[in-house]
Image (cartoon, grey):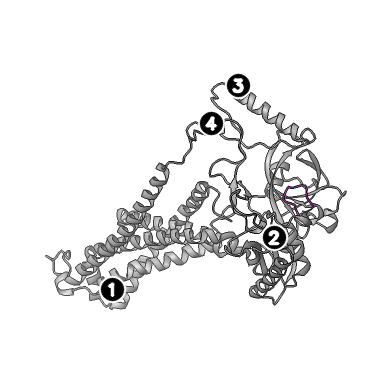
């Protein structure tokens, strides 16, 4: 019967494929980012550790000295670790050097996550001892890109910032933490410092580390936070100038990783759900129109013995079959849709890189297809299963007018379809208006024909401050001489690019204040000609 009406079948199947495909693609993203647990052993016991201002209680970095105290005093954890992302100049055996993101971490980092290397080993306590060989553990992606997945790379060396590091292990593909880290390096003395020439055990007022911990079996998050609060109060009394304003907080690691993406993804899932409701109303209207054309056929079936339940079963079966065909085509659309979403992602959605249309997504598509088939088929089936035998079976009847109830049902479907479409249209219009407002908003600096690059000279040639100054002088001189270059300037951070430093200030017109009460401000180091190069008026 579907073959006899190819135009109708193609229109309905394609319409369903768009709705089911969009929902399947969006479900794949939501499932991969929000619903699936972290790929770590007993991931529900892994927490993110923060040291935050008591008046703020947002996310915050940990001072190295504070972590030493936490690790010594806390009893709620099997193991704790800290890490800091760094940008390294990596020199491969062949090819050009490149700037690559890596993580400097405690030797207990992999113990907290419960991840076992696929090649070699992880860190041991001796890896952080001074004077030991510098070791490195590679991520799966970095191993594939830089070493072509060769299995004989253990104990080979790679140069980071001009220094040789020995490869001791390769982690599985599931480990992508911190986000987009290509390798992990053990920190000297097991705790990274904040860059200052001070022992990390003395860096209490400098906050630069992220922390993770594995709760002991049977220990609740509330108990762990109560203990951190008690330890913070003790440290505040012991170090009032550096620690009195800060408190330790533990949150589930998954909440920290995906918390910012939860609302946008659920809003998008709701939007594509509305699209599917529009599809359901649209197809239901088409089926009701087709049922009018089939009125004579259904009347004959009723006349030769088919009761109402039989007719409804037949019509619902046809609807589900159509929905399943549309679902198969929709899954193909979903594969393309996921690839499109991943290609458009600017890197702001966490855990999105490994998302695929997996078994969960296929099961969702199957369930959605059956449910959709029932939804758009039940009203037409209910209406069409009550044929008017006498009028319909007359030779001169056309069966195309229908009764008032059918007109009421069609009007209701049209009203629902238009209403949901209007909601989506208004939402899309407001989103577009906000986007245009942001695009047109003056940023205070020139973006036209502006290029930036990030460079970090390292190695034996750059030890003294004078070496760096001479390097930057040569860079600005040579870049300024390039054809087409109008102006050149140096900066520690581009506008709206992050990476700013924080400085405490003692105003001259106020009495001397304790260090923990001084006002603080963000600041950026810039070179000569910065404001004119950026087009920033003074």
Label 2 vs label 3, nearer the camera: 2
Task: Decide which of 489, 508 is in the foreground and name it.
Answer: 508
The disc placed on residue 241 is: 2
Q: In x, y percent, where is residue 406? A: 21, 69
State the residue position of label 1. Answer: 382
| Residue 196 part of the magenta segment | yes
Q: At numbered mark 2, what does the secondary structure look like: helix, strand or loop?
A: helix
**Range of residues picked out in magenta:** 191-199
State the residue position of label 3. Answer: 481
Q: In x, y percent, where is residue 411? A: 22, 65
Label 3 vs label 4, nearer the camera: 4
Q: Earlier in the sequence, mark 2 or mark 4?
A: 2
Mark-to-mark CA distance, 2 and 3? 50 Å
Can residue 122 be seen at all in this image of the molecule? no
Q: Earlier in the sequence, mark 1 or mark 3?
A: 1
- Quadrant that contains the N terminus: bottom left
Quarter of image, res 147:
top right
Label 1 vs label 3, nearer the camera: 3
Neighbourhood count class around disc 3 (C-alpha, 10 Å): few under 14, some 14–19, many 20 upward: few
Neighbourhood count class around disc 4 (C-alpha, 10 Å): few under 14, some 14–19, many 20 upward: some
The disc placed on residue 533 is: 4
Q: At numbered mark 4, what does the secondary structure look like: helix, strand or loop?
A: helix
Q: Residue furthest right?
A: 131
Q: Earlier in the sequence, mark 1 or mark 4?
A: 1
């Amino acid at each position: 019967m579907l073959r006899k009406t190819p135009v109708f079948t193609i229109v309905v199947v394609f319409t369903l494929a768009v709705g089911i495909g969009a929902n399947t693609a969006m479900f794949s993203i939501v499932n991969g980012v929000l619903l699936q647990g972290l790929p770590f052993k007993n991931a529900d016991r892994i927490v993110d550790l923060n040291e935050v201002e008591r008046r703020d209680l947002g996310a915050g970095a940990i001072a190295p000295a504070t972590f030493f105290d936490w690790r010594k005093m806390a009893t709620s954890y099997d193991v704790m670790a800290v890490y800091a992302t760094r940008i390294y100049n990596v020199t491969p055996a062949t090819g050009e050097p490149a700037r690559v993101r890596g993580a400097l971490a405690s030797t207990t980092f992999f113990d907290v996550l419960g991840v076992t290397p696929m090649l070699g080993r992880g860190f041991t306590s001796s890896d952080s001892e001074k004077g030991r060989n510098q070791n490195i553990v590679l991520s799966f992606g970095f191993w594939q890109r830089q070493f072509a997945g060769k299995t004989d790379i253990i104990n080979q060396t790679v140069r980071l910032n001009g220094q040789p590091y020995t490869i001791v292990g390769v982690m599985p593909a599931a480990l992508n933490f911190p986000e987009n880290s290509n390798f992990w390096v053990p920190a000297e003395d097991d705790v990274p410092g904040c860059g200052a020439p001070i022992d990390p055990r003395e860096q209490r007022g400098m906050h630069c580390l992220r922390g993770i911990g594995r709760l002991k079996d049977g220990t609740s998050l509330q108990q762990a936070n109560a203990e951190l609060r008690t330890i913070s109060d003790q440290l505040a009394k012991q170090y009032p100038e550096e620690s009195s304003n800060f408190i330790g907080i533990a949150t589930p690691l998954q909440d920290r990783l995906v918390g910012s993406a939860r609302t946008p993804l659920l809003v998008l899932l709701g939007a594509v759900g509305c699209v599917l409701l529009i599809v359901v109303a649209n197809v239901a209207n088409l089926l009701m129109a087709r049922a009018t054309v089939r009125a004579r056929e259904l009347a004959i079936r009723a006349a030769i013995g088919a009761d109402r339940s039989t007719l409804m079963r037949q019509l619902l079966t046809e609807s589900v079959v159509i929905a399943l065909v549309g679902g198969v085509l929709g899954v193909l659309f979903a594969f393309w849709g996921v690839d499109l979403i991943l290609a458009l992602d600017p890197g702001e959605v966490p855990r999105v890189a490994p998302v695929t249309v997996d078994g969960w997504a296929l099961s969702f598509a199957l369930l959605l297809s059956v449910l959709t088939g029932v939804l758009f088929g039940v009203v037409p089936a209910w209406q069409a299963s009550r044929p008017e035998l006498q009028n319909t079976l007359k030779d001169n009847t056309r069966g195309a007018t229908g009764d008032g109830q059918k007109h009421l049902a069609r009007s209701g479907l049209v009203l629902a379809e238009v209403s949901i479409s209007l909601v989506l249209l208004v939402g899309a219009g407001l989103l577009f208006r906000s986007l245009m407002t942001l695009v047109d908003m003056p940023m205070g600096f020139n973006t036209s024909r502006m290029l930036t690059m990030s460079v970090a000279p390292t190695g034996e040639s750059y030890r003294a401050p004078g070496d760096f100054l001479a390097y930057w002088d040569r860079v600005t001189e040579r870049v300024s001489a390039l054809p087409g270059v109008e102006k050149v300037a140096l900066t520690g951070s581009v506008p709206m690019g992050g990476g700013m430093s924080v400085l405490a200030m003692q105003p001259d017109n106020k009495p001397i204040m304790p260090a923990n009460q001084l006002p603080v401000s963000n600041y950026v180091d810039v070179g000569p000609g910065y404001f004119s190069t950026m087009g920033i008026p003074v």
